Image (cartoon, rainbow, N blue to C red):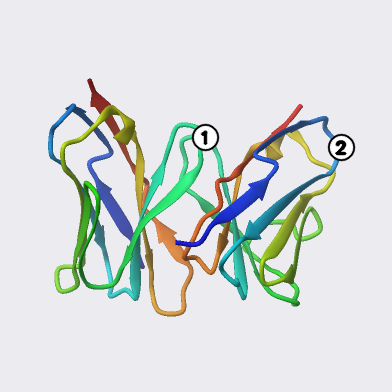
């Protein structure tokens, strides 16, 4: 069964801390997405990657194909980064499977 | 990334009415459109997949006569919730090609 697991489920940190959110999946994939969902509900696609590493501003996403694992890092975290971060994977030709999300709260 | 818009962003309606949600992909031609819904504190659930000019394919448990999907062009898809009931209250999200996501439409049925 194709499964996606995220950890931690909830994360609270002080402003400025380095944040890491993890995503593991059970079988080989064709692509992995990191999504951000703010309290209002809107979803923003942060990254789509199939190998290596991508960086956008303070956000970094990495993926290790052999270990079937991806991480999302946030440097110099800020209260506006507070949101739910969702990992979603796509197996070849299949629909996206979503993780349960990580609720991040950054305290000023 | 592509700009995807949904209209309306939120709607409140009475039970029994129909609601149409539009999804526009402004700079990405979406051959396939994916429609999701999300109940509070739950993950996104795929409702249906539609290919431009073809009938939609619905996931198990999603009533095709209740959730009408039209994908008439590569940049516009609509989801119509017919005879809405309170249990249809949810957050509806479109995704062109599973690569980009709309901002969502929050539907509340009274």
Farthest-out residue, top: A108
Secondary structure of the residue carrying tag 1 is: loop
A51 displayed left or right of B11: left
Looking at marks 2 and 1 on the same chain, the residue that comes earlier in the sequence is marked by: 2
- Residue identified by numbered label 1: B40
Position of the N terminus of chain A by quadrant: bottom left
Position of the C terminus of chain A by quadrant: top left
User: How many residues crowd around disc 2 within 10 Å: few (fewer than 14), some, or many (20 or more)?
Assistant: some
Q: Is residue B104 visible?
A: yes
Q: Which chain is mark 2 on?
A: B
Question: How far apart are labels 2 and 1 at the CA level?
Answer: 22 Å
Residue at position x 84%, y 43% from top?
B18
Q: Is residue B61 visible?
A: no
B46 displayed left or right of A64: right
Where is residue B70 shown, x and y percent of the image?
Answer: 76, 64
User: How many residues crowd around disc 1 within 10 Å: few (fewer than 14), some, or many (20 or more)?
Assistant: few
Residue B80 shows which numbered tag?
Answer: none
Q: Is residue A29 above or below residue A74?
A: below
Residue at position x 71%, y 53% from top?
B22
Secondary structure of the residue carrying tag 2 is: loop
Residue B65 or B52: which is nearer the viewer? B52
Residue at position x 14%, y 31% from top?
A16
Q: Which chain is mark 1 on?
A: B
Residue B16 shows which numbered tag?
Answer: 2
Where is residue B71 shown, x and y percent of the image?
Answer: 73, 68
């Amino acid at each position: 069964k194709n499964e996606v697991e995220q950890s931690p489920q909830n994360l609270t940190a002080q402003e400025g801390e380095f944040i890491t959110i993890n995503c593991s999946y059970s079988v080989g994939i064709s692509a992995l997405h990191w999504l951000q969902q703010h309290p209002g509900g809107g979803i923003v696609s942060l990254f789509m990657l199939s190998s290596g590493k991508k960086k956008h501003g303070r956000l970094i996403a990495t993926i290790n194909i052999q270990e079937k694992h991806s991480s999302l890092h946030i440097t110099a975290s800020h209260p506006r980064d507070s949101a739910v971060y969702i990992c979603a994977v796509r197996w070849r030709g299949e629909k996206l499977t979503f993780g349960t999300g990580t609720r991040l709260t950054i305290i000023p | 990334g592509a700009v995807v818009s949904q209209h309306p962003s939120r709607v409140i309606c009475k039970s029994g009415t129909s609601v149409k949600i539009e999804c526009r992909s402004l700079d990405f031609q979406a051959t396939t459109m994916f429609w999701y819904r999300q109940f509070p504190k739950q993950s996104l659930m795929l409702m249906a997949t539609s290919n431009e000019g073809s009938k939609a394919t619905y996931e198990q448990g999603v009533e095709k006569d209740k959730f009408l999907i039209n994908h008439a062009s590569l940049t516009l898809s609509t989801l119509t919730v017919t005879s809405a009931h309170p249990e249809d209250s949810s957050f509806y999200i479109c995704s062109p090609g599973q690569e980009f996501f709309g901002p969502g439409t929050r539907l509340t049925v009274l």
